[in-house]
Image (cartoon, grey):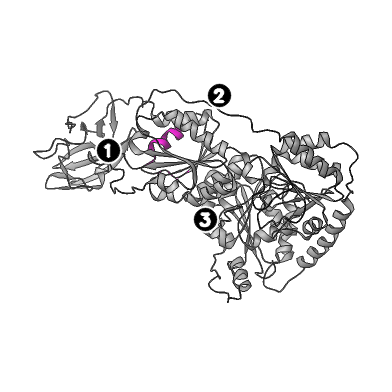
Amino acid sequence: MTDRHETESDAGNWHKLDELPEEGRVQTVVVDGRPLAVTRCAGRLGALDNHCPHQGGPLGEGSIENGWLRCPWHGYDYNPTTGRPPEGFDDAPVSYEVEEREDGAYVALPQKTERPRSVSDVMVETLVSWGVDTVFGMVGHSNLGFADAVRRAEERGEMRYIGIRHEGAGSFAASAYGKLTGRPAICLGIAGPGSTNMLTGLYDARLDGAPVLAVSGQVPSTVLGRGAFQDVDLSAVFRDVALSTVTVHAGSDHAELTGKAVKHAVDGRGVAHLVLPDEVQEQPSGAPAGAPTGRQAARAVAPPAAETEAALERLRSAARPVIVAGDGARAAQREVTALAERLGAPVLTTFRAKGLVPDHHPLGAGVLGRSGTPVASWLMNEADLLLVVGASFSNHTGIAPYKPIIQIDDTPEAIGRFTGVDVGLLGDATVTLTSLLDRLGDPVKATDQREDVAARWAIWRAEKARRARDDRGQGLSSAAVFEALTRHCPTDAVMTVDVGNHAYSFGRYFESSGQPVLMSGYLGSIGFGYPAAMGAWAAAPDRPVVAVTGDGGFGQYLAEVTTAVQHGIPVKHVLLDNRSLGKISKEQLAGDLPVWNTSLVNPDFAEYARSCGAVGLTARTAAELDDAMRELFAADGPALLHLHTDPVLV
């Protein structure tokens, strides 16, 4: 190894040491941004570079024994003032000249040199050029080089870093960001557990078609695959969840691999994964950043003419057509509404598309399926044609396969995925619906169903009002909670919902004014709600963000309240606490099983929120709901409303 124990000094660059060790002790200090191990041995002060030459661990955590500074990592000994190793060894930490003066001790440090542009800089600059601007992550020893490049981009105003408390929260937040915007955010973890912690949120993104870029630090290439600390074959681990998983090596085209990862995530609506060995991140690079110019194509394609004409013939002849809109129709909200009004056809939505047509619209019929309204199910049953736009035919939605169906989707495998359809239109929802509107013409046989929609809503609203008045003296009814939230929730809010009984109740009772709803759709992962709200805020910081969770889901990511406080994320959190995993209790009963091990011991969540620096509010009775909701939405910064609910009145 290279002999590094010559003293480095610069007489014009002296720095006063504010902290000095006692005799025979070592003290870690940071001077001019440099970590030093400062020693006092035999009355003489020494200052060494605070990095073990073997592994980089801090010498300042060691001790002086028999006149030698002992590295706590390996037991190697060094002269505490010169850094020289024992005879027979030629490696040593750098030492710096120290002077004791009347006004204190000073250390001479060399002038700082400008840090060279690195591989990580090239990658981050490429990400910025592709429009990636948000990172949710946890910084650690195996991603420090990449994290520092993100820090510099943040200082330039090009990126925003949100440090989370658990990598799983970071991946859920990135998934929510992708669902809302169609653009990828980054979730960042270290080697081993930091990366494996991200998997659940990444599976959520994969199954719901949200673009996400996962970046993993990795152990140094020299020990990769040899059983080193936190050595995990991350590409093997991520191969199922990711559209692509690539390890970036020293000789790689770093800009191209980075840009290609973003392209994979956006084009494939899923997860792309990059693995960065520790030493590659800091490798100097003069390569230019990559750019997306000419690398992306428009997705707005039209279906073939013959299929379009077949769909038009069915639409013209249907007496009671109904539109079923899924999350894939969100970008075509205006066209869905226009076609519905042209035909007088009700619009039913999947749960993920809740609010795509507001419930107060004369043709808005709410959510269809297990989380839905009897309004939607009645209208579907009376229909003689279903026009299904951007929906996946989940069994939770329950689109009737015995009805004639026209399906519009931009993904070939989605057409007729579970059962055959009468007409499949492969094309962009906006383009396809515009074509149908332009060519529909007259006459059409459709009956205006506005009166039916209004009549079914009147029946359902009367039933909701009755349920809202239910009170067994064991907490709030869900109907009362969501009746109040309907009145107080800002119409421009983005809403996130967790998994559990509260989600079913939200789907059927909350009347949307058009607020988009983000959820863990196909994965159905508990814990999604609160981290997703942080992702929604990052995607739309000028809009109110409302998280609706149960006590079970929120309990998985309690610590993220501190993340919201630290970064000023003004999540308004509606927490329904029934002191149990209520959905699991219902499933046990439905299976003729006893309710077992679903009860929970919960803290006072409002007090917990206050202890984190957020606003904490509580409501136990219907009489308290309005004031509590009013305070929640008037609060500055993150706020939590702890609602004590009846586990039966869902």
Residue 138 lies in the magenta-colored region: yes
Amino acid type, residue under disc 2 in the picture: Thr
Disc 2: CA contacts within 10 A as few (<14), some (14-19) or many (>=20): few
Can residue 540 be seen here? The reply is: no
Task: Pick whichever of labels 1 and 3 is earlier in the sequence.
Answer: 1
Q: Quadrant of the C terminus?
A: bottom right
Q: Earlier in the sequence, mark 1 or mark 2?
A: 1
Mark 1: which secondary structure?
strand
* Residue 418 position in % (x across, y down): 65, 53
- Tell me the quarter of the picture where residue 120 sits: top left
Circle 3 is placed at which residue position?
557
Residue in front for this viewpoint, 403 or 115 = 403
Residue 152 horizontal side relative to residue 227, left or right? right
Comes first in the chain, label 2 or label 3: 2
Residue 422, position as x, y percentages in the image: 74, 47
Which region of the structure is painted magenta? Answer: 137-151
The residue positioned farthest toward the left in the image shown: 87
The image quadrant where one finds the N terminus is top left
Q: Position of residue 261 (x, y in %)?
A: 49, 35
Q: Amino acid at mark 1?
A: Leu
* Residue ID for mark 2: 293
Nearer to us: label 1 or label 2: 2
What's the mark number on residue 36?
1
Q: CA distance from mark 1 to mark 2?
A: 46 Å
Instruction: Check if mark 2's residue and mark 3's residue have beta carbons within 8 Å.
Output: no
SS for callout 3: helix
